[in-house]
Image (cartoon, coloured by chain):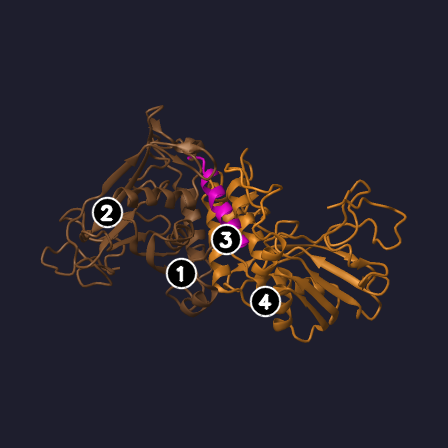
Chain colours: A orange, B brown
Amino acid sequence: MAHKPYDPGDPTSVGLVKLKHYTFDSLTLESGEVFGPVTIAYETYGRLNDEKTNGILIFHALTGDAHAAGYHTPQDQDPGWWDDMIGPGKAFDTNKYFVICTNIIGGCQGSSGPSSIDPATGRPYAMRFPIVTIRDMVAAQKKLIDSMGIEKLFAMAGGSFGGMQLLQFAADYPDMMELNILLAATAAVDPREIAFDCVARNAIMNDPNWNNGDYYDKPEQPVIGLRTARMIGLIQYFSEEYMRERYGRDFQKKEQPDFSWDIEFSI
Amino acid sequence: MAHKPYDPGDPTSVGLVKLKHYTFDSLTLESGEVFGPVTIAYETYGRLNDEKTNGILIFHALTGDAHAAGYHTPQDQDPGWWDDMIGPGKAFDTNKYFVICTNIIGGCQGSSGPSSIDPATGRPYAMRFPIVTIRDMVAAQKKLIDSMGIEKLFAMAGGSFGGMQLLQFAADYPDMMELNILLAATAAVDPREIAFDCVARNAIMNDPNWNNGDYYDKPEQPVIGLRTARMIGLIQYFSEEYMRERYGRDFQKKEQPDFSWDIEFSI
């Protein structure tokens, strides 16, 4: 995809933005465990109005982060992941709305997660980080919204794994928003998805560089297992119909198979 | 599953059987390569009639072998893979029919494959074994059938990957059989299947014990990559509907999740 570098003269961009952090003492997780301190990384675009009624909470998809719009530095070659949608005059119009995007807890892009330093040991939590659910993620987001003095969001929006967070947030705090914009999401994944998640997890945890999760200070990381997991994930994002239409059984840049171990098919 | 040990008094069993081998000089593969010598492992049950009109060719599924019925030794705890179907009085009645099952070339269960010794080097072919297609597999089976003097089979039967062989055999040699019994098969896998095959192949070839295929004399084999590949395969064998009905979102032998890294879900 074409890059879209920082342009200080672009009137539709939110421009330079900063990743912020909010830390609170503890969270009682769905498992019953009380975990803390908890840090949640977030960005905001636009201005919260005096009545605090123009907040829009954006949820990121799997492997996403809080950097939904704008640029962190003038050298950035690409804006945040939903920059097409967030900015002056855009769908989430920052002239009118105060847009908030957080990194999920467990997400390791600034929020507390397995790569965060455990204050008890001075080393990354790794596998000592508790298992968190989507309910726990939205409970942390709720604490951030509360800390801003926002009693009711104007809207929430999220797709895929972000849409699953939205559904959980709406179920747990049904009076906290006017509008929900749900994209490409489900309330519950089906057993095949659960099974493929298990394969992906196994691929990572069987990587010889996994080291029971303590790979942070090692020269080699479990990238091969992660690559397999990511391939499984990507295939799951497409419907069979879409793959048939887009790729079919075409060969990769050729008319005939070449009977080699290279990639033969377009898909 | 319950074992079904050898029982010399069972009148519905073909009893003790032997794996046989047929070797021919060479095969011109679909890729154009001329490969040889080629050995095909097979078993037969029942007796070929004088007119040679009662032959039934059985095709095995992925990871299968030529041992479709009976027992290799009196100590065997389980019969061949389709013993329920093949025997005196059974669906493929060996009192009437001469049933043949071969191991596909490339299958490494007695037929020429990557684990076979390359006469040129005295070591397993490994990655030097040519890439063979389903058309090549059935061409080898055709040579075996020809060697038996059978001009026309009474029937062919195969499921899954065995059904794909059956379709190819029927397409390539349409006058060589009276009946085709096709089970759970397709003429062409769809792009999602191609993609998952690619992930499975990658999982094996990225295993640190893969060693570019030369793992035969090594203490460690690429079993972890193979395990991931096999999990991907097994999930693909079930329809979404079946998985929903059989497993749903039930937990594994419990009512509630236990928020651990153990297997939580029934699937």
**Residue B76, placed above or below residue A26:** above
Q: Which residue is mark 4?
A: A186
The residue sitting at the left extreme is B9
Percent x, y for residue B24?
31, 35
- The residue lying at 12 percent from left, 59 percent from top is B10
Query: Are labels 4 and 1 assigned to the same chain?
Result: no
Q: Tell me, for residue B193, which label it has, or none.
A: 3
Label 3 and label 2: CA atoms lie apart by: 31 Å
Disc 2 and disc 4 in contact, CB within 8 angstroms: no
- Same chain, labels 4 and 3: no
Q: Is residue A151 above or below residue A125?
A: below
Chain of residue at mark 2: B
Disc 2: which residue: B43
Amino acid residing under circle 1: Ala
Can residue A36 be seen here? The reply is: no
The span picked out in magenta is B190-209
